[in-house]
Amino acid sequence: MLFTDRVDAGQRLAEALRHLREADPVVLGLPRGGVPVAFQVARALGAPLDVIVVRKLGVPYHRELGFGAIGEGGVRIISDDIVRRGHVSEKDIASVERAEAAELTRQAERFRADRPRIDIKGRTVIVVDDGIATGATAAAACEVVRAQGAARVVLAAPVAPPDAITWLATEADEVVCLSTPRAFSAVGEWYRDFSQTADEEVVTLLARSAADPPGAAESEEVAVDAGGAVLAGELALPDGAAAVVMFAHGSGSSRHSPRNRAVATALNRAGLGTLLFDLLTEPEADDRANVFDIEVLARRLADATQWLRTRTPVPIGYFGASTGAAAALWAASGAGPEVGAVVSRGGRPDLAGPRLPGVRAPTLLIVGGRDTTVLDLNRQARSALRCECRLEVVPGATHLFEEPGALDEVSVLARDWFTMHLTPQEP
């Protein structure tokens, strides 16, 4: 079987993995070449996409021949047979490992950017590569995801030699491979186009997947009229949406924030609409002073609320992050019953200052347990608020909730708060 390129391979592989769609899987691509294949699989299955960073340990005089691999979490696999036949010394092993460990750290930071790693605990995980040669890298990847708590590990690749598949069947719960030719010398011979995948392509594909996460409601680009300022936004209104949540981004982030998009997706899945929009125009955002002008941000949010009211009659809530949380509370203090609930993620409610006692909307403050300074500020703000208020601390989380599972917990807390306070409740 010959593949045109990695896109073609990914589309064909996705068809062979259709039976896993109902398992709510997470797709992990092995960078670099595995990510374009995994992107097609994730898109076809409606699954979230992340990377699993594993580095092959190549024989010094023949880099294509791997004598082992290392992965995130300190996983290390060595093929004693290849080490012996390749006459690889202990010194060579140590030297190659040091170099590859440094590259592993660099890749993980480069590819994920500021996005948190997807929590795979208890999930079905599909590990995807563009092809398998010795199987050492794929085996390391399977071991890494098991160590991270995956409930089921599926290894998927377009092509691999039969002996590698036989071995890997003992490492994964299921192996899906489209072609297992006996005359196998290199992965690239089974592709018409096997050009190298650049770091930039991996970063772009992961960003695209994060920007339009699975489960997100169909959205439309809108121009929000906020008191004369025209602000770019995306409005998602699921069929029969009982309420809509407006996102007030903070500290210079925009409607493209992967964290807020992840929360918005959770709200969409619960039947809530979302409006992700920028509180500042692009020229305004270039001036950092505007990011901390809470009064202006709050006024924009209030004006945008009136604009949204012309688009839908359903109840409205505010979700604010960092300085955006201060803007949300400031705007809510003057909105009265127009705003039915507020959620703050890692917020700076102290920046709303004397406006806090005027907030009437039920307010949920979510703070990371390791974000100690902001946690203290939220405790003080809770004392100043006169509305129904709750402070939820996510254990082990820092300010950006980058830790595995932390953002998922934020999403659940926000979803439940908005559902309880914005939608009709049965007696």
Image: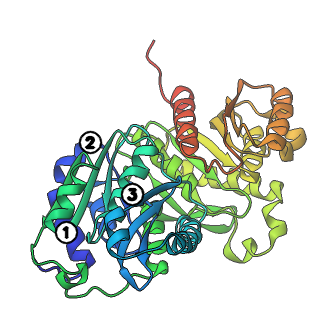
Q: Are marks 2 and 1 in contact (CB under 8 Å)?
A: no
Q: Position of residue 100 (x, y in %)?
A: 52, 71
Residue at the spot x=41%, y=74% of the render? Answer: 32
Residue at the spot x=78%, y=63% of the render? Answer: 291
Q: Position of residue 183 (x, y in %)?
A: 10, 78
- Decide if residue 218 is in sight here: no
For mark 1, give the secondary structure.
Answer: loop
Quarter placement of the N terminus: bottom left
Residue closest to the eye, 307 or 147: 147
Residue closest to the eye, 13 or 345: 13
Decide which of tag 3 and tag 1 comes sooner along the chain. Answer: 3
Disc 1 packing (10 Å; few <14; some 14–19; many ≥20): many
The disc placed on residue 4 is none
Residue at the spot x=12%, y=69% of the render? Answer: 179
For mark 3, give the secondary structure.
Answer: helix
The disc placed on residue 140 is 3
Disc 3 packing (10 Å; few <14; some 14–19; many ≥20): many
Q: Is residue 114 left or right of residue 25?
A: right
The residue singled out by tag 2 in the image is 23
Q: Are marks 2 and 3 in contact (CB under 8 Å)?
A: no
The disc placed on residue 160 is 1
Asked which quadrant contains residue 128, the reply is: bottom left
Residue closest to the eye, 75 or 54: 75
Q: State the residue lying farthest toward the top.
A: 427
Q: Position of residue 139 (x, y in %)?
A: 33, 57
- Decide if residue 381 is in sight here: yes
Which kind of residue does numbered mark 1 sit on?
A: Ala
Mark 2 or mark 1: which is in front?
1
> Rounded to the nearest whole Å, what is the CA distance between mark 3 and mark 1?
16 Å
196 relative to 378, above or below: below
> Rounded to the nearest whole Å, what is the CA distance between mark 2 and mark 1?
25 Å
